[in-house]
Image (cartoon, coloured by chain):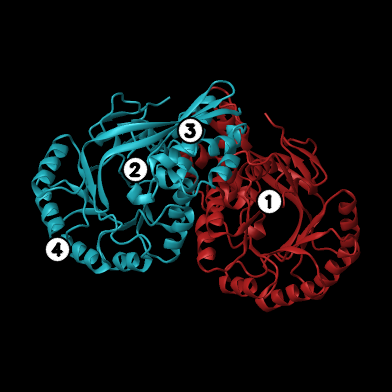
Chain colours: A red, B cyan
């Protein structure tokens, strides 16, 4: 069934509280929703969400891609999605738009063929557990939030670090006292030097902290630095900002620079994300899945992708929880960290 | 929809004339058909076809896997195909059965959801051009067959070599006189030493023969030999017997040992074939698709896979043409080298 029209819509969200990572602070999140209408009236939805400090995309520029995308894919058939993906591959400067368009296409494809999206991706699971993220804030506020999340059932906490090594250690040790069953994803967002990163890992290891992922410790283009941390850290080292495309992923695999990749649809779209899933499997490296600032609409796509492929050891799909949303638009159910997709 | 039953059936074909490659001669082909029936009566079909000299599989052992496969996947839902593929991954000694079962599952999935298989795979194309293969035979018979195929419209000839370098050169030069628009896939099936392989390539290059693929020149486990040929041959060097799994593919990519991979569903199943497609794309290496001794039933799956993914520079999907078949059971149309899948 052919695509009749493509519409973009800019949407505005406020963070429940300012969200700080080593690269900057966000109080608001502006996303672009993509709606694809097929000739039979079927609609597919996607959401483009970017953080300027990560990808250099702004909502203004994302919105301006509407006409380009219309000209690119209008009239194409969703059953020929590989041809559509050849087109979206050209959206190099706007991976979030590439992702939103690909998500909308697969959404429409699935609706048209009576498939749930997670079934299209292989139907490996219909339940996943997500972590929850604590941005960089004071020690007091960090502990307070961690306690709240712990009481809500979250057992995997993602802690943002990378601005001050001493304070980072202090926070993690303090939070760790909350419960013996806590695991940590420690995310530096490129904030450390390679030696600092190894120092942090060694300290936490001596203190017996259960770090399950040490994410993007060093600058995204410092592949040798990443490799240094990987080979000198007792914890699995994951690339996030270092990997947008399948080509990035293969380079790091060839360099043996990583233990894990954090796939985000907003960086890779469905097309490259699928390729990275296969690459990681062949290379025997682990995967986690993350998000940018998607609302419940956009996060649904990542949930389906993660559940369907069943490829991820850790799920960091919590952005919707940090935004003020008037209406919940996900097609999943959530209780604390547990996310469920209804079975057909 | 759940799988109710799985049935295997052994089928017997005769080659139109004895088919010789450097590894041996075949006069008959025994395959195993796999039929999966879903609870709603939907049926999916696959065909397992192996050459003992390639994979060590015999039809007798393939047939004996029926009960194992039944116990493995009966009751599973085809919409959870990734879970089924986790099971089929265990069929390590019988890749042809793995392939046939995966093909039957995807066939049933597609029928159930009103999808043509090539659409499931992305719908990149619905037309492909196949080469045609000339086994090892006398110079006279080789030329005679080549003339016949040329008159039928075939412009890409796959020539089996690897038993006698001097005769191989002689044949190719003679066949090349038939038409200026001929291209050659030269397939040694592991028959040469690395130095012989380079010698052949150099001679053909000096004679300006248009070789588009130099396939599996050396022993399958001689990765350094393959690499030697790759870096010293003017023609693209492809791995065939060297690559069954995605792990094989990644190893050769890491070693920079190849220009191309020949994917066959009978070696890799749909699961590993899909992974190899992504690996090759990320690595920027080319792909061709080949076959074992499939009838029109089994070759259909490879045609859908190739057309849908659109990933292949060359198609060597001609095994059904060399078998005596009472009934044509493909769901494609063929005119000489041109194969067409009906559009929805």
Q: Which residue is mark 4?
A: B206
Output the chain of dot 1.
Answer: A
Q: Which residue is mark 1?
A: A291
Taking the spot 72% from the left edge, 33% from the top edge, the residue there is A342
Q: Are marks 2 and 3 on the same chain?
A: yes
Q: Which residue is mark 3?
A: B104
**Label 4: which secondary element:** helix
Q: Are marks 1 and 2 on the same chain?
A: no
Q: Which residue is mark 2?
A: B291
Disc on the earlier residue, 4 or 2: 4
**Label 3: which secondary element:** helix
| Nearest to viewer (mark 1 / mark 3) | 3
Rounded to the nearest angstrom, the CA distance separating label 1 from label 2 is 41 Å
| Nearest to viewer (mark 1 / mark 4) | 4
Rounded to the nearest angstrom, the CA distance separating label 2 from label 3 is 17 Å
Front position in the image: A244 or B336: B336
Output the chain of dot 2.
Answer: B
């Amino acid at each position: 069934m052919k695509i009749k029209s493509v519409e973009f819509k800019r949407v505005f969200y406020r963070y429940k509280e300012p969200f700080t990572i080593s690269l900057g602070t966000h109080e608001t999140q502006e996303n672009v929703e993509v709606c694809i209408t097929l000739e039979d009236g079927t609609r597919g939805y996607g959401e483009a969400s970017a953080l300027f400090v990560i990808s250099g995309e702004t909502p203004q520029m994302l919105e301006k891609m509407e006409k380009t995308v219309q000209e690119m894919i209008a009239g194409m058939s969703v059953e020929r999605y590989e041809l559509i993906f050849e087109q979206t591959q050209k959206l190099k400067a706007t991976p979030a738009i590439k992702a939103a368009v690909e998500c909308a296409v697969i959404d429409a494809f699935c609706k048209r063929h009576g498939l749930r999206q997670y079934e299209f991706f292989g139907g490996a699971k219909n339940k996943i557990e997500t972590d929850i993220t604590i941005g960089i804030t004071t020690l007091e506020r960090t502990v307070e939030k961690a306690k709240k999340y712990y009481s809500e059932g979250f057992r995997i906490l993602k802690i943002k670090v990378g601005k001050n090594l001493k304070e980072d250690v202090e926070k993690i040790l303090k939070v760790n006292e909350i419960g013996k069953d806590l695991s940590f994803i420690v995310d530096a967002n490129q904030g450390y030097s390679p030696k600092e990163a190894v120092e942090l890992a060694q300290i936490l290891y001596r203190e017996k902290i259960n770090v399950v992922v040490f994410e993007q410790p060093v600058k995204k283009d410092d592949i040798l630095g990443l490799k240094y941390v990987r080979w000198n850290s007792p914890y699995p080292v994951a690339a996030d900002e270092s990997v947008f495309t399948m080509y990035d992923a293969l380079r790091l695999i060839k360099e043996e620079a990583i233990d894990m990749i954090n796939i985000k649809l907003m960086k890779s779209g469905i097309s490259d994300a699928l390729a990275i899933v296969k690459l990681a499997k062949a290379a025997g490296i682990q995967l986690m899945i993350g998000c940018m600032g998607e609302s419940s609409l956009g996060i649904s796509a990542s949930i389906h992708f993660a559940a369907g492929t069943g490829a991820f050891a850790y799920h960091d799909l919590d952005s919707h929880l940090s935004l003020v949303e008037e209406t919940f638009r996900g097609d999943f159910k959530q209780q604390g960290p547990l996310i469920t997709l209804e079975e057909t």
